[in-house]
Image: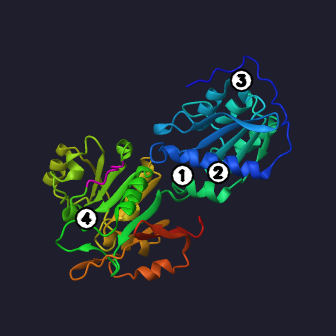
Amino acid sequence: MTIQSPTTAAAPLAPTRTIDPDLDRRFMAAAITFARRNAGRAWPNPSVGCILVRMDRGFPEVVGRGVTAAGGRPHAEVLALRQAGEAARGATAYVTLEPCAHHGRTPPCVDSLITHGVARVVTGIEDPDPRVAGRGHAMLEASGVEVARGVLARDAARHHAGHIARIRLGRPLVSLKMAISADGCIGRRGAGQVAISGPVARAHAHALRAESDAILVGVGTVLEDDPQLTCRLPGLEDRSPIRIVLDSAARTPPGSRVVAGARTVPTWIFTAPDAPADRREALSIAGATMLVAERGPDGRMDIEDVLFQIARDGVTRVMIEGGARVARSLLDQDLVDEVQFVRSAVTVGEGGVPALAGLPVGEVLASPRFVTVENRPLGGDRLVHLWRRSIG
């Protein structure tokens, strides 16, 4: 998609004010918040936020803003420039991620910023994509555009952690979310879904789904709970992530809710190579996308292979929402980047399913791998939010 540009690119105007670091942080924070608008929708591209600001009689004025569109195109900078029009000339662009510098299906955003006379570009982090990786900043500076890097870098890195993981690790960001009872359980055997957390925490879980590219569970969760795994917050029903089921033997019932709704909200089912062909075919006919992953040394699904495959298909962020063995396997293999435990006062009692298949929750909370970034009430429950230390 092409932006209407002046026929002759004029040199960008120099900023007409003294740089105010507090103002830079303020608008970068706004750009990061705006970027969350399409988190979970922009993949395979990162959801970037861009805000264009001019100084008018000594006061900042937002003249354009954009967020990466659903499906990854157009980019945030393109949309912000289109909204600003001629007001972009001499403005400052606040961009959460270094503008792209390579030709893909559209020209580089760097070229658009230069052509439209943006005077200054403030970025949160450098893009780890080797096609960019500093080239965007260098091209802007070579064209006379002032560049300020690393403003609210930690916050920008957290927001773009899925993109970073996919580029650097070849897998999506893995976010583990669990509601855990006072006696350390996530449910009761044979009881189906058990309400552990309250309504505020459940709404929070649905909001997390809306910001995730995919949600992953083991087949045991499907057989026990028959969950929908959709976002059901009013107004966000169209933000449901892809549902991914680990099911080595293709035991998922074709009539289960994740399969019955697969033509509306995609469901990907990973089976082992030796899964019964008739079961695979029945699930495929019912609407599920059937995929194959290898078995690991323990005979279970090789979850690293699954993560590699979904990253290859563009998924940047996957939320793990069940069950205990899947969560334990990911933690044991050091594949978890973010943890959100909702601690409840509810007691499950006899027949309770331990949250992490025998791994004490306290070990995760005390692990040097993670840093606690939130510990706060969530309605009648408590949210404990951890990030991998290298990200947090």
Q: Amino acid at mark 4?
A: Thr
Query: Which residue is labeled 1 in the image?
Result: 163
Nearer to us: label 2 or label 4: 2
Tell me which label, 4 or 3, sits earlier in the chain.
Answer: 3
Query: Residues at badges 2 and 3 in contact (C-beta under 8 Å)?
Result: no
State the separation of the CA atoms marked 3 and 1.
32 Å
Which residue was labeled with disc 2?
A: 29
Which residue carries the number 4 mark?
A: 221
Closer to the chain start, of discs 1 and 2, is 2
What kind of residue is marked 1? Answer: His
> What's the mark number on residue 106?
none
Give the quarter of the figure containing the C terminus: bottom right
Is disc 2 surrounded by few (<14), some (14 to 19) or many (20+) residues within 10 Å?
many
Q: Earlier in the sequence, mark 2 or mark 4?
A: 2
Q: Is residue 57 above or below residue 293?
A: above
**Residue at point 47%, 52% (across, down):** 316
Q: Looking at the image, tell me whether mark 2 or mark 3 is earlier in sequence order.
A: 2
Residue 52 against residue 378 in the figure, above or below: above
Q: Which residues are magenta?
A: 228-233
Mark 4 or mark 1: which comes first in sequence? 1
In the rendered view, does 160 fall on the left or right side of 335?
Answer: right
Q: Residues within 10 Å of mark 4 (few under 14, many from 20)?
A: many
Occupied quadrant, residue 295: bottom left
Front residue (pair 20, 125):
20
Question: Mark 3 highlights which residue?
Answer: 86
